Each structure stands twice: as C-alpha cells, then as structure tokens.
Amino acid sequence: MQMHGTNSNTTQQNPTKYIFVSGGVLSGLGKGITAASLGLLLKNRGFTVTNIKCENYLNLDSGNINPVEHGDVFLCEDGLEADLDLGSYERFLSQEVGNANFTTIGQIYTTVIKRTQDLHFNGATVDAIPYVPDEVIRRIKETAKGFDIILVELGGTAGEYQNAIYYEAYRTMKLKQPNDVVHIHVTYFPMPGHINELKSKPTQLSVKLLNSMGIQPEFIVGRAEVMIDEKRKEKVAYYCNMDKKHVISNPDCETIYELPLIFDEQEFDKLVLTELGLPLKRGNLQPWRELVEKIKTPQKKTVTVAIIAKYIATGDYELKDSYYSLIESLNFASWNNEVDINLDFINAEQLEKKAPEVQARLEAADGIIVPIGWGERGVEGKIAAIKYARENKVPYLGLCYGMQLASIEFARTVCGLKGAHTTEVDPNTMYPIIHSIPFDERYQRIKGEGASMRLGAYDCVLKPGTLAHKIYKEHGAFKDAKKNLISERHRHRFEFNNDYRKQLEDKGFVISGTSPDDFFVEMIELPQEMHPFFIATQAHPEYKSQPLKPHPIFVEFLKAVAKFKA
C-alpha cells in the first residue's frame, strides 16, 4: 500500500478539494469510519489527504466528556483530547492528527466572541449568520493548506439545531466553489423483521431535510445490515435526484477494516475523484487485503484477557467504546501474533465486592490489564486484580492508572506500607506513593481552575537490561536508540512520588523508564525472575497502535499471555 507524507504537496497547481461527510436518520452510523475508509482509498491513489472533525458540543475538547456517554477520548501527539473518530483517521490514514483536525461549536463561538471583543469586525452587528459559519470555513481551509483533499466530518445528525452552522458553512462553500466541494450523506436503511426488506423512506426524508437547507448531496452511503439491492438504489436515486451509481452500500461486516475494500469494489473513490475533476491515479491495496484476510482467518489458539474496567455501564446496557483504542490495539496485536483474543471486561466495583462469579472470571484469565481511570470508584477492585496477577504470575499490563495502582499494590503488600495510596483518592494517606506536583509549564498544561495535566507526547529513557528496553529494541521502536529514548503519549494529572523510589526498588521493584531529566517515573516492571511479564507505563501506547503497525508492548504482552496459557 502506498504511503505518502502527511503534507508533502506544498506546490499545488490545483485547488484543494473538500469532501463533506454528514449523517442522517440516527447517530452512531459510522461517519468517521466511512470518511476514514474513503480517505485511505484516496491516499492510496497518491493524493495527500487530511481531515477535520466538526463536533456539536460547547466543550473546547473531548477531555471532560463522560466516556460512557461519548466513548473513548482519543489522545493526539500534540496533547489534544479529541473524539474517537480522530483515532480512526490515524489508524486508516497512518498519519498523525491533532488540534488542526478537530473543532467544536464551543471553540468556534469562543473565537467569534473574542474577535468581537477585540473589534476585529469593525463595529459590525455580529449575527450568527454569516460570522459563525465563516469561522468554520476559515478553520477548514486553514487545515486544508498544502493538501490535495480534506475530509470534513460533520458531527451529529442532519436536522439537529446544534450543527446547523456546519451545514450553512458547506452551503456557502459549495456556492462559491461548486467544482471543488462534494457532499456525502451517510444514512440508515432499516430492515424490520416483520417486513424482511430494506426500507429507503428514512433516507429519502433525511435528504429532503438537506434539500430544505439548500443542500443536494452528490453521494449517499447507506448503512444497513446487508448490501443495498438495486431496487432500493433505484428508488433512492429517483427520489433523491442523483445517479444510481452514487448510492453506495456500507453493510455490516466482520471487521471495519474490510470497509475500504467494499468501497473499492463499488469504485466509490473513482466516482468521488471524477466528481471532483481529479485524475484516476493507480493504487495498491494488497497490504490492506492481506490484513483483512488475516483478520478473517480463524486462529488455532484463543487467549482470554481480563480488562478491569469501570466505564462500561450505561442504564441497562454495557458499552465498551470507553476503551475503544485499547480494544483495537489488542486486536492489532492478536492479528500480528495469529491468535484469537477473548476480551472479558470485569467491572472493578463488582471485583471490589468479592463476588465469587467475578473472582472466578479473573482467575480464568490468561492475562490481566488495568487501563486508564480517574477517581476512587472501583480502585480497590483494580488493586485486588493487580495483586492476583503479581502473586499468581499472570501476565500483567498497566496503563496510566494501571501503573499508579501497581506501584501502590507493591508498596502495600511487598513493602508493608499499609494504607499506601494516591492522594487523588486519599489526600491524607501516610504513604502517598502517587501524588500531584506543583505546576511547571515545562511539563503540564492548565486544563481549568486548579487542574493541570501532562498531555501529549513526552520522551522517556529506558534502562538497558529491562523488559521494557528489550521490547522496544526488538521492534526497532526507539526514537533514538543510542540514547535509549522512546516517545509515548500522556494524559494524566498525578505522578509517582520520588520519595518512595529507593524503598520500593530495595524490594525488587524496577523503574525501567524515566523522563530524560529523571524527574518522572514513566515505566515500571518486576524482574523476570520474580514475574515472567509484569509491566506498566504511565503513558498510553494504545493511542499509537495501528492495524499495519501494532504497538510492541501489546504484541509482546499477547506473546506472554499465549505462553502463560500454554
């Protein structure tokens, strides 16, 4: 598969092309996966492609949004906490995204109001139209500079009053640049059980809603349980005023990574390029085809990994989108290791209550992960799982909070520091193994009043001879091998307390990674003579793992899990 630089086309002769992707009928259809899949196909044909996600909420980023309601925050290299769709763009396009690729209604209104205060508009009466859509257009065009094509994903569903400014921005751009802008509308074709056929009426009504805003989409992408048949395509094309070939199927499939191939079979990218007046360059999807083939091939071995979770319950349902990047990273590693993986999400609060059936699930696991988390809810359940993994030599991987709590468990159980804790949960603990540090602009950024965080990519020096060093060396994953330097993304507020380094190390605790100035503990582990695979990091390697390039830590963790089961 051809891979091109993220912004190499700096001497463009042709204007940038804009592909807007909106959604209709219902939310959660997969606009981001649709746009990312199309982006992969366009990039594969030699075009430079970027994206921007336009969200509806007033939040300035996704950092403080309830993960159960909105899914996993995707952490970018530059520290942006964004919607999980940005993770799809990174994984499908194999290129980094960041602040330029994400905007919210809150950001847009804040900017317009600030400019009004600064007399930027020379005393004009600043109405929502056109000043707010103009700011949307400015951001889109700023992000698009230097690229052939930009994918503009509009959050929410057509008809919501919150996102009307985005549709007005599209209408304005289409009016001024009719040959450079296309609109793709992702809709839903339901198939009621008592009828047993796809119904196109919701799509027709959604397009009618767009028409009422002065918008005629060039393409409809129909989400459905199955491929859309010719009769439905003909009906939609007739009532929605478009060519039947421009009605594209987006069916449920075994893996989302199959979608680019399904689009390729329908020549979706060719039709879009023709609509935009761009040449049909040749591409090579073979690596992606091989990946999908590997994903769909059942493996002889299956391992069970327990994820000790707390962000999974919403009403009467359990959702796993709160850990989406972690799940995908484990999937990528499983395909690489040619082993099927059974993920068992164990509720940390239930583990805390020592329910026998929950304990039995923990004991049945071949590997244990304690992922990201905040606050006291379920903490003792997580610590109990870590203790079980350490004492029973079950492969363990700690991510962020999983590193902090592993340090606390070791301090309590091995070092005898009863009541050791993090000041996030117990501000009065006698042994603050994890604590907050004074703000320093070299390390942290202010997120709000009284709240500072380390966000984005930070360097880490690995200690030679450790498991962490061995993993990164074996996979050629150093940022600078001569300096034993790696770089990983961070998203946290509390830190390992350096006052306890020696006390824990004297009992066998290994600090295998620190910041270049040795101030932050970034990675910890146990000696392999004490435990075959017990490693935890303050960072979030799950945000850098990709389908064609799985992160080394997850690859080696699953190797250890398979070995443990064997």
Image (cartoon, rainbow, N blue to C red):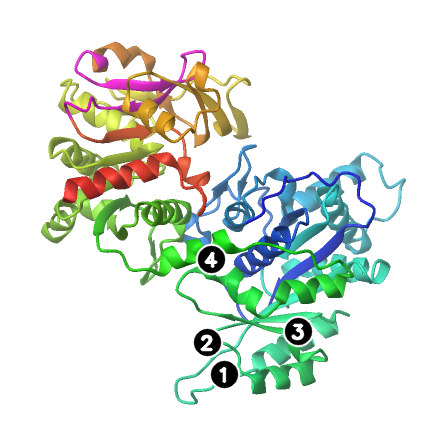
Q: Say which of 339 and 490 sits in front.
A: 339
Viewer-proximal residue among 43 and 139: 43
Secondary structure type for disc 2: loop
Query: Which percent across, then down, holds residue 223?
Result: 52, 71
Q: Earlier in the sequence, mark 3 or mark 4?
A: 3
Pinpoint residue 300: horizontal percent, then vertical percent: 22, 55
- Vertical side of 125 occupied by 448: above or below: above
Image coords of residue 146 (percent x, y) = 74, 41
Judge left or right: residue 55 versus residue 468: right
Residue located beneath label 2 in the image? 226
Q: Residues within 10 Å of mark 2 (few under 14, many from 20)?
A: some
SS for dot 1: loop
Q: Earlier in the sequence, mark 4 or mark 1?
A: 1
Please name the residue that numbered disc 3 is placed on: 246
Return the mark for residue 198.
Answer: 1
Magenta range is: 505-530
Q: Quadrant of residue 160?
A: bottom right
3 vs 1, front mark:
3
Question: Is 98 placed left or right of 290 in the picture?
Answer: right
